[in-house]
Each structure stands twice: as structure tokens, then as C-alpha cells.
Amino acid sequence: MEEALSQVGLESAMDRPVRVRFAPSPTGYLHVGGVRTAIFNHLFARHHGGAFLLRIEDTDRERSTDEAVEQILDSLRWLGIDWDEEPVFQSRRAELYRAHLERLLAEGKAYRCTCKPEELDAKRKRAVAEKRTYKYDGTCRDRGPDQADRGPYTVRFKTPWEDLPRSFDDIVLGEIPIDAERLDDWILARSDGSPTYNFCVVVDDADMGISHVIRGNDHVDNTPRQLLLYRALAYTPPAFAHMPLTHGPDGSKLSKRREAEYRAQGISVSVQEYRKMGYLPHALLNYLTRLGWSSGDQEIFSRRELEELFDLGAVGRSAGIMNPDKLKWLNAHYLKETPPAELAGLLAPFLRERDVRVEPGERLVRIAEMLAPRARTLEEMADAAMVFFRAPETYDPKAVKKWWKADAAAILGRIRAVVAEIDLDDEQAVEQAFRELADELAGGKLGKVAQPVRIALSGSSATPSLFSVLSVLGRQESLARIERALDEIERA
RNA sequence: GUCCCCAUCGUCUAGCCCGGUCUAGGACACAGGCCUUUCACGCCUGCGACAGGGGUUCGAAUCCCCUUGGGGACGCCA
């Protein structure tokens, strides 16, 4: 692993202690694509015994909210992504940016630009109309430093045209060429004095001692500018690793705007949404990690294994499409792995959501245990659990047609007698009794007597083991349901 | 449009860097079967891919080039 990294020419960064960060902007819930880069950063830090930091990019005061910050932190905690130092808020570091800006200005590495937004807009439009790529033409760069009385100004970086790097190294993508044609004197600070993204990132990452910048592929084109800024500020640049993006089923970048389309396909952009849909945090974590990273043929990873095995060398280069089926499969796996007592606790809120008054206890644990192998999400599990809290209101017509034949009343009658007397908690004895009845009434076919009862108890032909259901339901409720089924049959 | 990136089953991927062991392996999904009181779980089997074209080589999924396809980026957003 280590060899693979040094190979791509990251000597300077490699010697530094690992410090990585996740930098969400708090304008809404935590995005699945975002959380995936958070996971990769976190795993990378843990693997190397380094630090994982959080930086809240809330310079856009219009759209940033405290609630969003809380929600994001909450989602991270839910996934078990812990951070090492107090989160950094960009909104509280204006002084730091200002100092750096002044330094660049004083050193002649940046300049004030008094071009009006309308002028710039016009130039951009003209460029587009003439099918040229727009770049700032350097009007103010040529005007010289004396811009004091020309009104509001932005600060632009003075791109050192005579000395540009030809390429940079990326840990996952390899060598990326830098196209000077794409560069221009971009804006470091707006006319209201606030710093722009590409400037903040560099100042912050340098200030926070970030050793590796692990982020989405969509930032590749920002990297040359940031590199130039590191050089201008005489800071050692971090190593860069650009992860493939997470795509929706349509093959394009996950977008909050398509939430509605996604919902129909069983996926979401919001981490919180997966929580609501009844996914276990580790299942999501395992899924998202495995999307774009692999370790041989292994699919299931414990947290511990992930931290041991994860490294950037095995990260893929192509985008991954969210596959809800596989996520569900993983979730089902972890549902089965979760101890029943714990599962009961996780299930409870989903039952409350369905207006069930749940008391924690052995009964709920047994329900969770028997439902675990039959559900892929807590939602499904809660749906299936309703049979234990509500008597059936209707009986599945298809099941009725198939199993409530002419002899159903007779069978149920005999079953009622058994249920009235036997100890329902002795599931073996109950099964024995049912088998004897089957021998007597159905030529030994247990299904012939079990199915009518199952339908009577649940309204459906599919439930967990009938004997477990009887036990959990208890004598009184079981008899009541059988009674009602008998009425129903008589009426028909 | 310009620049950048990507390209193995429908999807996630192993293999690629260090060509032969690949009649290309695993997983999800799908189909069939076994187990079975139903439904699931589990187990077994099957279906299914090296985008195309040129090179290089005794030999290419693996190296090079082109084409095609897909994605991303082009703000006084982040």
C-alpha cells in the first residue's frame, strides 16, 4: 500500500502525520455522495492512525442554517463517524482569510479588480456567443495597483503565467495534466470582502494541517488553482485523492433535485432518509464503502475490518451507481446478525410509528428474532410485526380460496380444542399435537391443518412459524382469532 | 462548445500496475432445484461481461493509439 502511494510522487505529503477532513456546507441534510467521501476520509484516517476533522463551510450565510449543521452531525454520529477535534466553522475565521488576502496583495500576488459584474457578464456572454471559453481578460491586472478610487472591488489572484506546473499527481487518478488555457485570474474575495471557495479551502487546509485532501471527482478542475495558491502562500500542498462520484440509477451524479424520481426506485440522497426507511447504519456504511472500493471478493466488512483493510490504493476510478437491492441485501444480513434484544430496541420506534403501544420485553425480543430473517429493513419488519398487535381485519382472498375449503370449519374446530388446552409455550408439544391432527384428518399433511389456522390467526398464508406465532399471541388472543375465523367461514 | 476523468456480466466488482495460471472469478438481482407447516433464511445449479477498431508481442481483459459511449467541470456557489 505504502509503495503504491509514494510511487505517484507524494513524497512531501507522505512524511506528514495523516490529517484529513470532511467539509460539508450546511445548506440541507447530509448527502449520500457527501457522506461517502466522509467515510473514505474517516477510514483513511483510522487506518493510518491519523486525525479526522470536520470543517463546516458556512460562508454562504443566506443558505446555511444551524439546523442543517445539527442534522449533518447527527447523521455522521448515527453512522459511527466520529471526529477528532472541534469542528471548524468558516464563518468564524474571517480574520484568517483577511490576513492571507492582505499578504497576497502586499506581495503582489493578487490585485484589486474594479470591473463591474455587468461588464463581466457581458464579456462572458460574448465569449459564449462566439463559442470561445470565457476567461477574465485581466483588465484590472494591467491597470496596476492604484485602484483605490474606482469603487467596490474584488480581489483576484495574479496567475503566474510564466511559471505554471504542467501537471499534478492524484493518488487515485494518477497524473492529471494542467491546461493553462483553463486558468485565469479568478476571484479570491468578493466585493463585500468575503473570501471565495477556492481561497478558503487552501487557507483552511493549510491552517488545519491537512495532509491528504480526499474529495469528490468534481473537484479535480479546482485543484490546479488551489495548488497555485499553496505555492503563492508558501505552504506545503497536501496530497490529493479524487474519489469517483456516486450516481443515481440514471447514471448521473446524485442530485437533491431528483429526490422524487429516486424514491420510486428505492433510493434517496439523504442519509436521514435511509434511517427512516429502516436501514442499519453499518449496512449503509458497508454498502457505500464497497461502492468504489474493494478488497478482493469480500462483501461483508465489520467496522474493524474496514479500518484495517481500507486504503486509497484500492479505490476505483469509475463512478458507482446506487443499487437499492444490494443495499437491502446487506441490511438483511446485518438484521440477522444483530442480537434480538438489540433488534427489538431498534424495531420499537417503527412500531410506535404505526400507533402500536410497545413495551420493551421478552415478547418484543421474540418477535424481532423470528422476523429478522424475513425482513430486509426495519420498516418491513415492523409491517410484518403488526400481526402480533392487531387481529386480522380481512383474510387474503387467494389464501382463503386455497385453504379454507369445505373441511376448514371442522379443522379449525379441532384446533380450537387443542389450543384451549395445551401449553402454547411448549412449541414442541403443540407441533406434536398438530401433527397428530394432521395424521387423523389430512393423511399426515401438516400443511392441510396448519394453513387454515395460519390464515385464521394472521389473515395471510405467510407468517413465521405457526407454533411461535401461537406462543407469542397467547391462548386468549389465539382463540379469539380462531373464533372470528370460524364466524367468517360460517357466514360464507 | 472547451477541458478533465472513466470504460470487465443489468448493477457493484476481482483480475490490469508486474502480459500466458482467464474456456474471465465473486456479490446483488433474476431463473430452476433442495430444505420445509406457509413465507423467509440457508444450500446447490443456471443465466450473464473484457465497448469497437488498430497496433506491440510467440501470446493482450491486461501495454500503446484512435473511435465510440458515459460522466464531471467550466460563477463575485460550494
Image: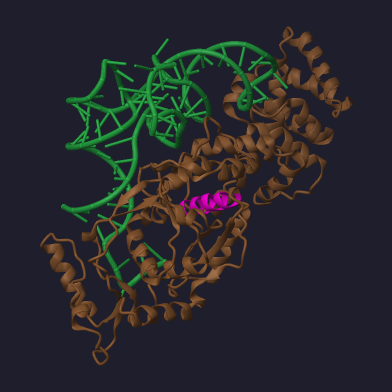
Estimate the x, y position of residue B10 in percent, counting from the top left.
38, 31
Is residue A355 depicted above or below B47 in this figure?
below
Prevalent SS, magenta region: helix
User: Image quarter for residue B74?
Assistant: bottom left
Is residue B32 depicted above or below A26 in this figure?
above
The answer to whether B45 appears left or right of A393 in the picture is left
Which range of residues does the magenta coloring cover? A33-46
Does residue A41 show up magenta in the picture? yes
Instruction: Work out which quarter of the rendered image holds the C terminus of chain A and state it.
Output: top right
Estimate the x, y position of residue A415 in percent, counting from the top left.
79, 21
Q: Nearer the viewer, residue A432 or B9?
A: B9
Query: Which chain is represented by green in the image?
Result: B
Q: Residue at x 44, y 81 (%)?
A: A99
Estimate the x, y position of residue A468 in percent, counting from the top left.
77, 29
Is residue A344 depicted above or below B2 in this figure?
above
Q: Nearer the viewer, residue A249 or B39?
A: A249
Residue A266 visible to an observer of this rendering: no
Q: Nearer the viewer, residue A437 or A268?
A: A268
Q: Residue at x 23, y 66 (%)?
A: A162
Is residue A98 depicted above or below A167 in this figure?
below
* Colour chain A is painted in: brown
Q: Residue furthest top?
A: A443
Q: Residue at x 61, y 47 (%)?
A: A281
The answer to whether A414 appears left or right of A88 in the picture is right
Estimate the x, y position of residue B9 in percent, counting from the top left.
38, 27
Residue A158 visible to an observer of this rendering: yes
Q: Residue at x 38, y 46 (%)?
A: A173
